[in-house]
Amino acid sequence: MYIPKHFAMANTDEIHAFFEANAFGQLISYVDSRHFSTHMPFLMCRSESTVLGHLAMQNPQHYQLHGQQVLITLQGPHGYISPQWYCSSGVPTWNYQSVHVYGRASIFTDRERIERLVTGLTERYESALDEPWLPDYTESLLGAIVGVEVIIEEMQCKYKLSQNRSRRDRMQVIQQLRLRGDKSLARAMERNEKAKERVRYDG
């Protein structure tokens, strides 16, 4: 991923937090010498530096996945930025946040491990509901998927949030995003501003 220095994010805790908050992404590998992508949720195990997920048994991606170096891409809030929102001259652009994970993939079919994985995924997202559904997977359902483990080799993180513009321009962009209902991207920019202020203060 091309990451100009203005937009680079190197804080490991921030990258992990972003991953956990935006854990639905793409698993990209090769199938018969062509790029192949599956959109899926992921779980990160920080202590073991791995990412876990699962694929349907009928998905052809898993047949050639074992041993490949794969790419996982995750995306956060994003949106169009008009040059009309700046105090000084500029051009149209797009603000966004993304993480790319490179790693070596392996496939596992152990039922107990697969059940722990899907239970972990279910509990994570059901916990946000008023009445969470309790995991109860049959043997046939568990047998219809395979587990994927990716050992992390490199993580890249890019926060393109108008850091190359003046603070006045950034505040204008945040205001315009809020007026247009793009609150998620506005909040991301505000969090980035607060983080910069903390760094300045601590320094």
Image (cartoon, rainbow, N blue to C red):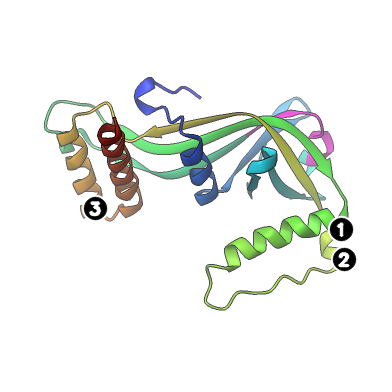
| Residue behind mark 3 | 178
Q: Position of residue 195 (x, y in %)?
A: 32, 40
Label 1 with label 2: CB-CB less than 8 Å: yes
Give whichever of discs 3 and 2 has the lower sequence position.
2
Q: Look at the image and tell me whether residue 144 can be seen.
A: no
Q: Which residues are magenta?
A: 62-71
Q: Is residue 161 above or below residue 109?
A: above
Q: How many marks?
A: 3
Query: What is the spatial separation of the Cα atoms under label 3 and label 1, in whole angstroms?
Result: 46 Å
On the rendered structure, is 87 left or right of 102?
Answer: left
Q: Which mark is residue 143?
A: 1
Query: Looking at the image, which residue is at 76% across and 28% down?
Result: 68
Label 3 with label 1: CB-CB less than 8 Å: no
On the rendered structure, is 91 left or right of 122?
Answer: left
Indicate the amino acid at tag 2. Answer: Glu
| Residue behind mark 2 | 139
Q: Position of residue 123 (x, y in %)?
A: 64, 65
Q: Is residue 33 above or below residue 116?
A: above
Neighbour class for label 3 at 10 Å: few (<14), some, many (≥20)?
Answer: some
Indicate the amino acid at tag 1. Answer: Gly
Q: Specify the quadrant of the image occupied by residue 47.
A: top right
Query: What is the spatial separation of the Cα atoms under label 3 and label 2, in whole angstroms?
Result: 48 Å
Q: Is residue 43 above or below residue 115?
A: above
Neighbour class for label 2 at 10 Å: few (<14), some, many (≥20)?
Answer: few
Q: Position of residue 120 (x, y in %)?
A: 68, 59
